Image: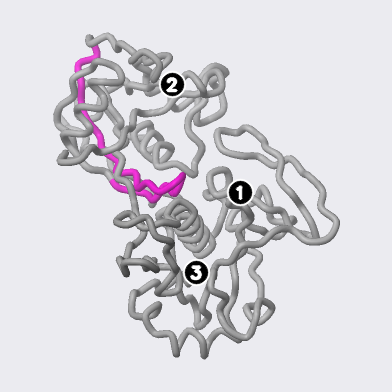
Amino acid sequence: MTTSPPFQLDRLPTLSRSTADRQEQLRNDPGRLVARWPTARVVLLDDKGRTPVPADTVGGAGVPLSVRKAPDFGAEPPEDAVFLGEWEGADYWALPGAPEGDTETVRVAGGWGFPYEAPAADGEVWIDLRGHGALLDDTAAGLFTTAVALRNWHRRGGFCARCGGTVRRVQFGWATRCQSCGREEYPRTDPAVICLVHDDVGTNGEHVLLARQPVWPPGRYSVLAGFVEAGESLEACTEREIREEVGVEVRDVRYLGSQPWPFPRSIMLGFAARADRAAEPVPADGEIEDARWVARAEVRAAFDGEHAELALPGNASIAHVMLRAWARADP
């Protein structure tokens, strides 16, 4: 009897892709960064975390970012400039920005297949990371993800956690220093687990446990996730979150992969686990509207666009990669 191997992620999660060199030594060399500023490139982010891409690439794959020439923003990096890294001989930075000139609103496809409105001007469309991360090329995905993560951290960390004093950016955006007590702070990332629970038939099961939150659009389901608590291991968090959210006990928790999720500052740590399908899910009141076991054939149909009642996560999420890998595996 042949036993199927445990399923693994069959590709890198969308927002884990990156090509730029972001070594700490680069951002701690002010002389080098200032000297290279005249040839550097700038990624712009508006107040909603969107960035421009060429309008004629929207909807395609391998989309690049529309970057600006650094000298357009001054002879040296502005105080609010954040260094993102080096790629193919050029330094990349992030700065606040917005569309200029005559702006129109266009509808573009977003996450989960639902369209949203985006500003467009001068042959560019300003897209968000959650809805379009999967369509970007590797360099663009890495730069955009890093820029959004640092932007969100700075927007929430304007005051010192020790004395309440105002902080100032140092290390070109990779740290802050309190102007009152001198305390330094570095970018925060909140760990969260996300787990694909399947039944115990064979190695990979025949059904997966999916759930939906009350605020999600009709038909939208995903795997379960939750934040790691203080003093808690990742495996213990996985078991606790699934128990709390749907009342199901899991076992054989194993790691699959990770993905940054800067909304506002998380990293998603992906796991798989097994459970008894006879265990009827009991949704947590106020958190989970519905939870159910779904057969592999239904998941495959949803990915093929042939399931009218089941919408799975958009491919910017690690949940998409986890579910697709499981759907392609044998039990």
Between 26 and 156, the residue placed more toward the observer is: 156
Q: Which circle marks residue 212 in the picture?
A: 2
Question: Which is nearer the eye, 306 or 249?
Answer: 249
Q: Which residue is mark 1?
A: 48
Q: Residues within 10 Å of mark 3 (few under 14, many from 20)?
A: many
Secondary structure of the residue carrying numbered label 3 = strand
Q: Looking at the image, which residue is at 65% across and 39% down?
A: 109
In this view, the mark in front (2 or 1): 1
Q: Position of residue 323 (x, y in %)?
A: 38, 33
Residue at the image position 39 percent from the left and 50 percent from the top: 260
Residues shaded magenta = 257-277
Which one is in front, 166 or 72? 166
Residue drawn 45% across the image and 27% down it: 300
Q: Earlier in the sequence, mark 2 or mark 1?
A: 1
Q: Is residue 306 left or right of residue 227?
A: right
Instruction: Say if mark 2 contacts mark 3, CB within 8 Å.
Output: no
Spatial CA distance of label 2 from label 3 is 37 Å
Q: Quadrant of the N terminus?
A: top left
Residue 175 visible (yes or no): no
Based on the picture, tell me whether residue 187 belongs to the magenta stretch: no
Q: Amino acid at mark 3?
A: Val
- All told, the count of numbered labels is 3
Q: For the point 60% across and 58% down, which residue is it?
A: 45
Mark on residue 1? Answer: none
| Residue type marked 2 | Arg
Question: Which residue is disc 3 drawn over?
Answer: 82
Q: Quadrant of the C terminus?
A: top left
In whole angstroms, how far apart are the C-alphas of marks 2 and 1? Answer: 26 Å
- Residue 174 visible, this angle: yes
Could you classify mark 1 by the number of other residues whose Cα lies within 10 Å: few (under 14), some (14-19), or many (20 or more)?
few
Queried whether the magenta region covers residue 260, the answer comes back as yes
